[in-house]
């Protein structure tokens, strides 16, 4: 039984990898994190890979991480602190300072309740949600714009990945340049590299 399950997992991963490689072999990626059109193109390629290979989006991956890491947390304070840890580990900046506002909201609700807020306290959680709704309104965050926020996150991720690719390419060329047989070779512009030639 376990062997069969392992085999199925391996085949699934193999199929997803082959699907991703098939798309990468066809699509031209320009390693230029400073060019918004190159970032957008790369984000679209990654989106196609995710859709065809049935992979999580970054937002879905974060949601899954939150669900699995917080399911056994009984109180709201530890839950919020765990969300902060997840955000930091994933390298997401809290540019709006929402976390501090959320902790202030929790303080306010707990003061009202005169006890720590537990997640199974529906009345207390409704009070906290009402406070969070006020924060979202203040920050201009609307539920109907969630798709837009997801797209912005994917664009940021694409830019970060292109920056990493550029850094790796420059380091590889620099290492190559130090070798005697390449010392007179001119360093090429990473933008001119075609990743498809290296796959």
Image (cartoon, rainbow, N blue to C red):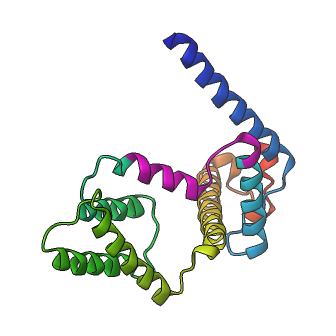
Q: Residue at x 19, y 74 (%)?
A: 110
In the rendered structure, the answer to whether residue 169 lies left or right of residue 68 reads right
Inspect the magenta stretch and tell me whether residue 43 lies in it. Answer: no
Residue 78 sits above or below residue 124 on the image: above
Q: Is residue 186 visible?
A: no
Query: In terms of depth relative to the viewer, which is nearer, 68 or 188?
Result: 68
Q: Which residues are magenta?
A: 51-68
Magenta stretch: dominant secondary structure: helix
Q: Quadrant of the C terminus?
A: top right
Q: Is residue 136 visible?
A: yes
Number of numbered discs on residues: 0
The residue lying furthest to the bottom in this view is 138
Residue 80 sits above or below residue 62 on the image: below
> Where residue 166 sits in the image (x, y, percent)?
64, 61
In the rendered structure, the answer to whether residue 138 lies left or right of residue 17 reads left
Query: In terms of depth relative to the viewer, which is nearer, 160 or 147?
Result: 147
Residue 80 sits above or below residue 138 on the image: above
Task: Name the image quarter holding residue 127.
Answer: bottom left
Q: Residue at x 59, y 65 (%)?
A: 160
The residue lying furthest to the right in this view is 26
Query: In terms of depth relative to the viewer, which is nearer, 163 or 12?
Result: 12
Task: Name the image quarter holding residue 81.
Answer: bottom left
Inspect the magenta stretch and tell me whether residue 56 lies in it. Answer: yes
The residue lying furthest to the left in this view is 114
Q: Residue at x 77, y 43 (%)?
A: 52
> Where residue 68 sits in the image (x, y, percent)?
41, 46
> Where residue 131 sits in the image (x, y, percent)?
36, 80
Q: Residue at x 61, y 64 (%)?
A: 163
């Amino acid at each position: 039984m376990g062997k069969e399950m392992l085999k199925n997992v391996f085949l699934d991963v193999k199929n997803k990898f082959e699907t991703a490689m098939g798309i990468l072999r066809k699509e031209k990626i320009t390693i230029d994190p400073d060019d918004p059109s190159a970032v957008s193109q790369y984000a679209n390629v990654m989106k196609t890979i995710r859709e065809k290979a049935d992979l999580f989006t970054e937002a879905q991956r974060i949601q899954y991480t939150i669900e699995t890491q917080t399911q056994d947390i009984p109180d709201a304070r530890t839950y919020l602190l765990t969300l902060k840890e997840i955000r930091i580990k994933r390298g997401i900046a809290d540019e709006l300072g929402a976390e501090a506002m959320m902790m202030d909201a929790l303080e306010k609700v707990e003061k009202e309740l005169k006890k720590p807020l537990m997640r199974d306290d529906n009345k207390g959680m409704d009070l906290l949600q009402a406070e969070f709704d006020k924060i979202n309104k203040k920050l201009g965050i609307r539920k109907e714009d969630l798709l837009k926020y997801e797209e912005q996150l994917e664009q940021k991720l694409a830019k970060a990945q292109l920056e990493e690719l550029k850094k790796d390419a420059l380091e590889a060329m620099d290492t190559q340049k130090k070798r005697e047989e390449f010392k007179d070779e001119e360093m090429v512009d990473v933008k001119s590299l075609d990743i498809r030639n290296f796959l």
